[in-house]
Image: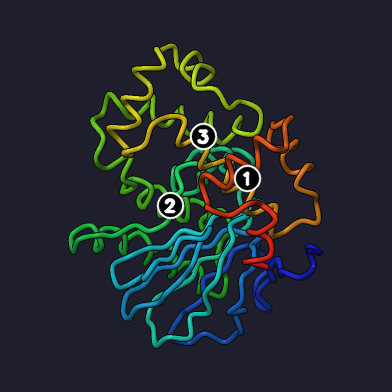
Amino acid sequence: MESKNIQTLQFKLPDEKRILFEIISLSNLDREIPPSIHRHNFYEIVIITKGETKQIVDFKTYNVTEKEVLIIPKGSIHQGSFKEKLEGYIVLFTPEFLTKEQGDLLAHFEIFNASINTNLLTFDNEEWNDVLQFFTLLQKEYFQNKNNKNTLRFLFLAFATKINDFMPLNYFLKSYQKPALKFFFDLLETHFKNEHLVNFYANKLKITSKILTQTLFNATGKNTLQLINERLILEAKRELLFSSKSIKEIAFELGFEDQLYFSKLFKKNTTFAPQEFKKEFA
């Protein structure tokens, strides 16, 4: 399969703006969004205030309804056209919209970490009103004719920080557990291609493998090895669909010297052999 068979969406500068950031109203959607499977080269945040929409992100199906936010990180596989009658907004941005320091900060937010793989956030009434206060300020600044780029950046970071606070890992964990969990997922996102052993992550965190696995299981319901393998499989799926690389090349890039072992691991986690997966979803 050639990579050109599946579209990668590029960020398009809004006509009246000269910044790599955009807010789109879903009740007045003036562009065609491909309903077929595609990949993003930008970040997307979907905010639903009324109605319901079905969206697929990295092979997970989400029915997004009011008082919910869907996060679609850069590089994600996405399918969904927003054809339903909806009210809400889509926020689009690229890393270049932010300064380097701001981008480095955002890179550590759990909402954009593919290793955590939790894309949908649901809020109660009080939380939703809190989130909307931040978003309203951002929206107001954006739609002003003479908006200030630096002000937009700070308001966006404030909004992103607020919704990041409601990630399950942040919201339900005890305070003393959060640093270790955040560090683990940062490490995993950085090293998953080359480091497949639990001991590597435990040593970096200066705890035993047993304690790490127990902590992760209490927080996510999954053990360390499951989380490592899930991130590997997700990346393998992306590469199988969006590149013309051979299975051997993909296996090698993901740290597997033995293609057969990679194929067995892939089938164990997906029920498909890699080549079968390509044919099924291409």
The image shows residue 168 at horizontal and vertical percentages of 31, 45
Q: In the drawing, what numbered circle is on residue 99?
A: 1
Distance Cα–Cα, label 1 vs label 2? 15 Å
- Of marks 1 and 2, the one in the foreground: 2
Residue at image mark 3: 228
Using the image, determine if residue 204 lies above or below residue 85. above
As helix, strand or loop, the secondary structure at mark 3 comes to helix
Using the image, determine if residue 249 lies above or below residue 56. above
Using the image, determine if residue 49 lies above or below residue 252. below
The image shows residue 242 at horizontal and vertical percentages of 72, 59
Distance Cα–Cα, label 2 vs label 3? 26 Å
Q: Quick one: 269 or 118, which is closer to the camera?
A: 269
Q: Is residue 248 left or right of residue 148?
A: right
| N-terminal label among 1 and 2 | 1
Q: Quadrant of residue 208?
A: top left
Q: Residues within 10 Å of mark 3 (few under 14, many from 20)?
A: many
| N-terminal label among 3 and 1 | 1
The image shows residue 132 at horizontal and vertical percentages of 31, 64
Q: Quadrant of residue 36?
A: bottom right
Residue at image mark 2: 160
